[in-house]
């Protein structure tokens, strides 16, 4: 069974990441005879591998076939359906999943947003809506979560917003009876009614009982991440297993006290029902469904007095999960939860423990399990979350027993009593709130005591291979664990590091920040940020995109920040950047009075490691509009030149053409995001770039870059790129090719083929 599970996993991943060379109809026709031959001559493993590949690929085709096209752009569309989950409410908007009714073709599930603060949408209710839609999209940058991948995992076929002036119309005739959702809705409403004065603890109660975590603040998530306890707040197998084990013990103890025969079935049924019920109450996510199915299998087999191998049960559950939803492999929770259980079920205890008393055995077993989990999950944590918490094992050794024996039982008991005895449930909620507050206070103390932040190894190229080698050595079976094997693995890790490319003397990263600009210019030892992206109500690109990117590439400080001008889409993230990382000098055309920032003027220049930087505009602000007074930066290394012109328009472009003889550049950020008021014929012919990059939002309302602008840049041989379609772009100077496009983030091979642009454009060959 283990080999079948591995084959199913590999086949699923291959089917979602490797697009077949034929269409879905040809694939479906060829799959049946191929599976028959595989089953007849190749055995179960080959059958599982091929079957999983075909099944996952067909899911990819089915998802793509329901994505909308350009025909819906800027159109008001009427839709009917039901709210599929609990809305996420913020100060600015309400976001929610919306399942369409009677939609055999086209989008079946939408992710919508309403900016009407008076709108009260309820999970499970149905409405007629008037919306504007787009295909699923999202910002795509290193270090930032992939929203488009999340939308695919949720089977969202379009995103959009409710049109102002067209309020939702209730459609009770469309409602479907979903007892799990209604139960969660009732419990959530009672929790919010009972806990009104302690919003932070109420958010944690909602997350632990019904799996609604939208109210948990970023500061709380950061606390759990910094202490290595984030797994306690995301309902996982630990929670479901505790419910099953607790009910098993209670029923068995009750039977013995009543003098009844020691039958396993009452306890088995109670534990299985509790595990299944809690998984449904928590929203039936990947970790909870895996844990519930595993509990049911283990309980069923043990009730028949069999002795199943836990790893066999885990393998069977994995196969069921992959068949039910191949997209589950997109979830980091899927990988972390299965790997954690695998590490625990393969743990072997020393024979010396047999002579110890039970409490000592339990303490040693808990310590060994925690150490094994910390070591085994170190590399996945770095790969998925860029995190390694130094005090995590110690904190978890104390936090898990307290959480398991006190916090979670009290929360669940309170939620259960709300359904039966509401008065008692409200009293227990108050007690659970106090316990959660004390638990969080202890975690805050642990965070302050931590010697290093969780992302202390982010961007370090030595970290991954070294941690991987150490993990492999510590988890190797005893016959293979020796000094020689350790040295061999470390030598292999060092060899991998030695084979990595040397740092480029000049790197340019154009970030995908939507309608705005943020560009990172790097030399081997220095970093400059040009513009900081837009801001919006409740956030900005500095905190959501720029800082995560800098952490991901290992930049610990910015030697300078240049803001081309004061428009919100260029300066919006400045305060967040200054607060989140050490910054040297800040330059802009018109610094605020009283600030420590400097004015950028024509003639300013400096050199970092043979890379020259020069401000060529403006000489002063008089006579220029804010856009036309943008600071224009030229970056030169050897024969390569990069131009970052901000939002200049035709007047400033004319002055540049008349004043400078050396405008020709390898890379230019298209002025004013591709507006018709910029990129004049004379300017485009003078620049003649190899790459022209427009920094825009997907399907923006101005329709930037304008078609004539794109045509002009392409007419001089430029590779015209748009971050809305490519994601972040990475350029580097190479000895053989000069300044060259190295990567377009949306085309990264780690993204599934169904959302990865597969263009034949030569300039996107990176």
Image (cartoon, grey):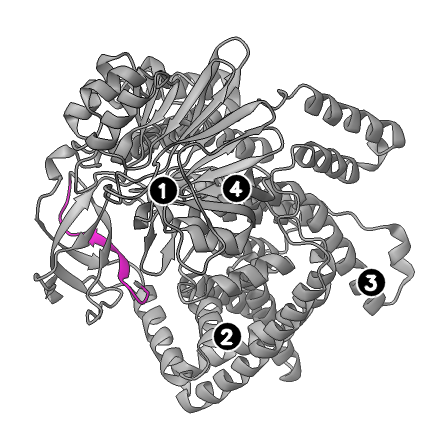
Is residue 482 something one can see in this rendering? yes
Foreground disc of the pair 2, 4: 4
Q: Earlier in the sequence, mark 3 or mark 2?
A: 3
Q: Earlier in the sequence, mark 4 or mark 3?
A: 3
Foreground disc of the pair 2, 1: 1
Vertical order, 534 against 259 (above or below):
above
Taking the spot 35% from the left edge, 39% from the top edge, the residue there is 517
Direction from residue 589 to residue 451 in the image, left or right = right
Q: Earlier in the sequence, mark 2 or mark 4?
A: 2
Which mark, by number, is residue 560?
4
Judging depth in this view, the residue of 485 and 648 nearest the camera is 648
Vertical order, 251 against 746 (above or below):
below
Residue at image mark 2 = 412
Q: Earlier in the sequence, mark 2 or mark 1?
A: 2
Secondary structure found at label 3: helix
**Marks 2/1: CA distance?**
41 Å
Residue at image mark 1 = 513
Taking the spot 45% from the left edge, 78% from the top edge, the residue there is 416
Residues at marks 1 and 4 touching, judged by CB atoms closer than 8 Å:
no
Secondary structure found at label 1: loop
Vertical order, 690 against 306 (above or below):
above
Q: Earlier in the sequence, mark 3 or mark 1?
A: 3
Judging depth in this view, the residue of 418 and 569 nearest the camera is 569
Q: Find residue 452 and report its horizontal and vertical position in percent.
A: 70, 54
Which mark, by number, is residue 361?
3
**Marks 1/4: CA distance?**
20 Å
Judging depth in this view, the residue of 667 and 20 nearest the camera is 667
Asked if the magenta segment contains residue 496, the reply would be: no
């Amino acid at each position: 069974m283990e080999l079948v599970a591995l084959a199913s996993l590999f086949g699923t991943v291959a089917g979602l990441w490797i697009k077949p060379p034929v269409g879905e109809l040809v694939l479906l026709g060829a799959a049946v005879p191929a599976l028959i031959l595989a089953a007849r001559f190749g055995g179960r493993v080959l059958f599982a591998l091929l079957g999983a590949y075909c099944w996952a690929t067909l899911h990819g085709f089915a998802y793509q076939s329901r994505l909308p096209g350009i025909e819906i752009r800027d159109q008001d569309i009427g839709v009917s359906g039901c709210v599929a989950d609990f809305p996420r409410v913020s100060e600015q908007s309400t976001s929610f999943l919306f399942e369409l009714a009677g939609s055999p073709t086209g989008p079946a599930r939408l992710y919508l947003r309403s900016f009407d603060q008076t709108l009260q949408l309820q999970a499970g209710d149905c409405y007629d809506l008037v919306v504007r839609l787009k295909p699923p999209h999202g910002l795509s940058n290193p270090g930032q979560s992939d929203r488009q991948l999340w939308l695919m995992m949720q089977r969202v076929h379009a995103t959009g917003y409710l049109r102002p002036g067209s309020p939702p119309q209730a459609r009770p005739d469309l409602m479907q009876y979903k007892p799990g959702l209604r139960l969660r809705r009732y419990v959530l409403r009672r929790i919010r009614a009972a806990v009104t004065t302690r919003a932070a603890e109420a958010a944690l109660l909602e997350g632990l009982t019904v799996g609604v975590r939208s109210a948990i603040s970023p500061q709380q998530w950061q606390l759990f991440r910094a202490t290595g306890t984030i797994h306690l707040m995301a309902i996982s197998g630990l929670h479901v297993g505790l419910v099953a084990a607790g009910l098993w013990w209670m029923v068995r103890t009750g039977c013995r006290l009543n003098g009844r025969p020691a039958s396993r079935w009452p306890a088995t049924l109670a534990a299985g029902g509790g595990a299944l019920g809690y998984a449904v109450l928590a929203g039936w996510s990947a970790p909870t469904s895996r844990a519930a199915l595993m509990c049911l299998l283990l309980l069923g087999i043990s009730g028949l007095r069999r002795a199943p191998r836990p790893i066999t049960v885990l393998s069977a559950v994995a196969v069921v999960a992959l068949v039910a939803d191949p997209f589950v492999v997109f979830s980091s929770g899927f990988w972390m939860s299965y790997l954690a259980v695998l590490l625990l079920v393969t743990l072997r205890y020393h024979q010396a423990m047999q002579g110890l008393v039970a409490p000592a055995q339990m303490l040693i077993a808990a310590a060994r399990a925690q150490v094994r989990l910390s070591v085994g999950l170190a590399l996945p944590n770095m790969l998925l979350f860029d995190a390694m918490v130094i005090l995590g094992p110690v904190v978890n050794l104390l936090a898990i027993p307290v959480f398991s024996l006190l916090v979670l039982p009290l929360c669940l008991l309170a939620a259960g009593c709300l359904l039966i005895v509401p008065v008692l449930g409200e009293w227990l909620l108050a007690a659970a709130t106090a316990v959660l507050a004390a638990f969080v206070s202890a975690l805050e103390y642990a965070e302050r005591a931590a010697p290093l932040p969780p992302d202390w190894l982010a961007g370090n190229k030595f970290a991954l291979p070294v941690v991987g080698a150490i993990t492999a050595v510590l988890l190797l079976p005893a016959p293979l664990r020796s000094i020689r094997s350790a040295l061999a693995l470390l030598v292999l890790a060092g060899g991998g590091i030695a084979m990595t490319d040397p740092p480029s003397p000049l790197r340019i990263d154009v970030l995908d920040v939507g309608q705005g600009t943020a560009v990172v210019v790097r030399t081997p030892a220095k970093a400059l940020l040009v513009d900081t992206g837009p801001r919006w109500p409740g956030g900005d690109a500095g905190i959501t995109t720029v800082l995560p990117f800098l952490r991901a590439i290992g930049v610990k400080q910015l030697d300078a920040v240049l803001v081309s001008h004061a428009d919100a889409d260029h300066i919006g993230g400045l305060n967040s950047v200054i607060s989140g990382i050490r910054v040297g000098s800040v330059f802009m055309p018109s610094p605020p009075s009283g600030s420590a920032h400097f004015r950028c003027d024509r003639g300013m220049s400096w050199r970092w490691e043979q890379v020259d930087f020069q401000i060529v505009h403006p000489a002063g602000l008089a006579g220029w509009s804010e856009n036309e007074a943008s600071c224009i930066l030229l970056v030169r290394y050897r024969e390569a030149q990069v131009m970052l012109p901000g939002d200049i328009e035709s007047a400033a472009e004319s002055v540049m053409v008349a004043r400078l003889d050396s405008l020709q550049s390898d890379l230019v950020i298209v002025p004013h995001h591709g507006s018709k008021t910029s990129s004049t014929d004379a300017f485009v012919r003078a620049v003649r770039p190899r790459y022209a990059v427009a920094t825009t939002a997907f399907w923006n309302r101005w329709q930037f870059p304008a078609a004539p602008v794109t045509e002009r840049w392409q007419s001089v041989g430029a590779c015209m790129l748009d971050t809305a379609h490519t994601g972040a772009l990475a350029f580097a100077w190479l000895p053989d090719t000069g300044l060259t496009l190295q990567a377009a983030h949306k085309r990264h091979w780690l993204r599934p083929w169904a959302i990865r642009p597969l263009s034949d454009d030569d300039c996107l060959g990176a």
